[in-house]
Amino acid sequence: MWNKRNYIIIFLFTIVIITLGTWVARIITGQTLYVDRLTRGIVEKFDDSSIYTFFRWTTELGSEEFLVPFTIIITLLLWWLFRDWLPALVFGVGTLTSHGLNILIKRLVERERPSILVAANAEGYSFPSGHAMISMVCYGLLAYFITKNLKSAKATFAVQFLFALLIFLIGISRYMINVHYLTDVLAGFIFGFIFLVGLIYLYELIRNRRFKIQS
């Protein structure tokens, strides 16, 4: 049965999709987004500062060099912990697929970066941020699977908060070190979150069907 909460979620989702569509349309036609014009000057103030250094290190937690071995290790660990291939498959394939999806969107939009920094994996197109999008999926799935085994509501909240903070810091680091526009990062979060919810829904659907068949 539909309730007020469902309608609110659909309304907010519609607003987000319309906003994303507007951003993409304006970027493709060569326009500069108002949000980016308003926020470009902020990051320039942090060059050669301790804040820049902090985010330069933080961004490595979303880099390909870190996430590839991390994903492999966590995939094997989930398989061992759950004694089941499904969580491992959803985590591993989901994280890998999010990378491919990010590349596809970037090639469709073809937005140039504000600056290139090879050492920080900042090459190629800019929209949406791969660090923000892939970290949302990778760390979001990890938080989801960890909390499934927790009994304490406080522990669950703590894990979710810490991973949410980590995802935010990794994503915003791309803006702070000036290799992405702010809208790149926001779009990465949004695309990543939508994909994350889809993967969790798929996992729950398969798991429930398996349970019904076994029972």
Image (cartoon, rainbow, N blue to C red):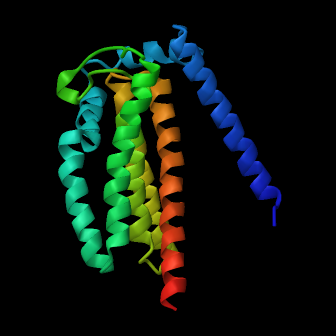
Seen in the image, is 182 located left or right of residue 170? right
Residue drawn at 43 percent across, 77 percent down = 150
Q: Is residue 128 visible?
A: no
In this view, 155 is above or below 105: below
* Nearer to me, 15 or 209: 209
User: Which residue of the protein is positioned furthest toward the front in this rendering?
Assistant: 213
* Nearer to me, 41 or 136: 136
Seen in the image, is 64 located left or right of residue 164? left
Residue drawn at 35 percent across, 33 percent down = 173
User: Which residue of the protein is positioned furthest toward the top in this rendering?
Assistant: 30
Residue drawn at 35 percent across, 29 percent down = 174
* Nearer to me, 55 or 30: 30
User: Which residue of the protein is positioned furthest toward the bottom in this rendering?
Assistant: 215
Quarter of the image where the N terminus is located = bottom right
Q: Which image quadrant is residue 131 in?
A: top left
In this view, 82 is above or below 92: below
Q: Position of residue 68 (x, y in %)?
A: 21, 48
Q: Which image quadrant is residue 107 in?
A: top left
Q: Is residue 211 visible?
A: yes
In this view, 7 is above or below 74: above
Residue drawn at 22 percent across, 67 percent down = 76
In this view, 38 is above or below 16: above
Q: Position of residue 187 (x, y in %)?
A: 50, 32
Q: Position of residue 81 (x, y in %)?
A: 28, 77
User: What is the tally of numbered marks visible in this picture?
Assistant: 0
* Nearer to me, 1 or 205: 205
Q: Position of residue 116 (x, y in %)?
A: 26, 16
